[in-house]
Amino acid sequence: MHFYRFTTYLFASFLCLMIFSCEEEGPAVVLDEAETLSDTTYVTSTIPGAQDKVILMEELTGVRCPNCPDGHQEVESILANNPGRVLAVAVHTPFLGQPFPGEPSLITQAGIDMESTFGGYDGKPASLIDRISYPGEQYRFLGLPQWVIRVNERMMETSPVNIDVSSTLLSNGNSGVISASMIYTDAASDHRFGILLTENQVATTQIVGSVEVEDYEQEHVLRRYITPVTGQGLGASLEPGRVFEKDFAFDLEEVWNSDNMEVIVWVSDANGIVHAAKAKLGE
């Protein structure tokens, strides 16, 4: 498969149809801790059974990327073949991602921060698989042929923490509260958690091969990170029975359709994401 080479953000907007290979030195990323509405931790003597580990795919994509629809199809195939075990986030960034005239941009600062934080890639589509740095791979962002291989590998892992997530929309329809609960079933250390919002069925123009396709439905579009993209630290000791209960406020942009949105919560250690969970926004 032909891949378009990654180039710096400065040139991406007007050289999006050419092939380059270069090292990216992104701007410094300021990762502020998210503010919580409530934050409770305690230890329970009732330890539940462990949930099956859920894998998180974070796919770099773009509306002007001719090969990215192949990535979209691969993601949907992986999701269909592993129901409930894999979550996907489509991360639109400036390289091959500039919007078409008259259409809103799907690029987010969170996506730009992710590129700066997790390093380079050979071309789009590319995806993080649980943010792991795999032996023998130059980058954490992997080319499409590696996705299903690494997902299958990660499927064999277990998680030391159970995650439950829910959210409430306020009557104004454009703000609400996310509630996340994390219960440790096994001991762990140095964990972080992340919370983000995605949207499905976002209609844009998309280059597919050599054709501009209108009303192409983008799925799993990253809309906003509630926490920093690298997550927020869990400050207590992580023994079996440790419980964290956290509430976060969120706001929605007017152009987002809350009926098509989901909230994802993940937990990571020093190597990568150990577990993830999602829920439909407002449920």
Image (spheres, grey):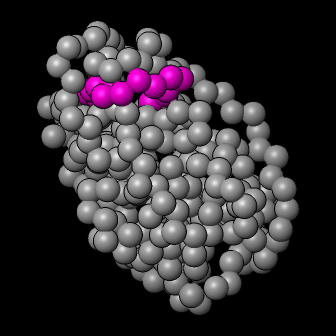
Residue in the picture at 35% in, 49% down:
54
> Closer to the camera, 80 or 157?
157
Q: Residue furthest bottom?
A: 210
- Residue positioned 31% across, 65% down in the render: 82
Say above or below: 168 vs 212.
above
**In this view, which residue lies farthest toward the right?**
22
| Quarter occupied by residue 99 | bottom right
- Residue 11 inside the magenta-drawn segment: no
| Residue 6 locus on image (x, y percent) | 75, 65
Question: From the viewer's perspective, is residue 241 above or below residue 10?
Answer: above
Which residue is drawn at the image coordinates 69% and 33% (left, top)?
Answer: 29
Magenta stretch holds residue 177: yes
Q: Nearer the viewer, residue 169 or 114?
A: 114
Q: Position of residue 80 (x, y in %)?
A: 29, 70
Q: Nearer the viewer, residue 123 or 102?
A: 123
Query: To which quarter of the image does residue 86 belong?
Result: bottom left
Location of residue 238 by image quarter: top left
Residue 79 visible here: yes
Prevailing secondary structure class for the magenta stretch in the rendered image: strand
Of the 4 image quadrants, the one containing the C terminus is top left
What residue is shown at x 69% (from left), y 69% (from top)? 123
Where does residue 203 sit, x and y in percent of width and height?
37, 68
Above or below, 277 against 33 in this view is below
95 lies above or below 26: below
Magenta range: 174-195
- Residue 64 at what x, y percent from top left? 59, 73
Task: Tell me the quarter of the image containing the N terminus.
Answer: bottom right
Side of 121 relative to 257 (left or right)? right
| Residue 175 visible in image | no
Q: From the viewer's perspective, tell me whether residue 95 is left or right of residue 240.
A: right
In the displayed structure, does residue 117 sit left or right of residue 56? right
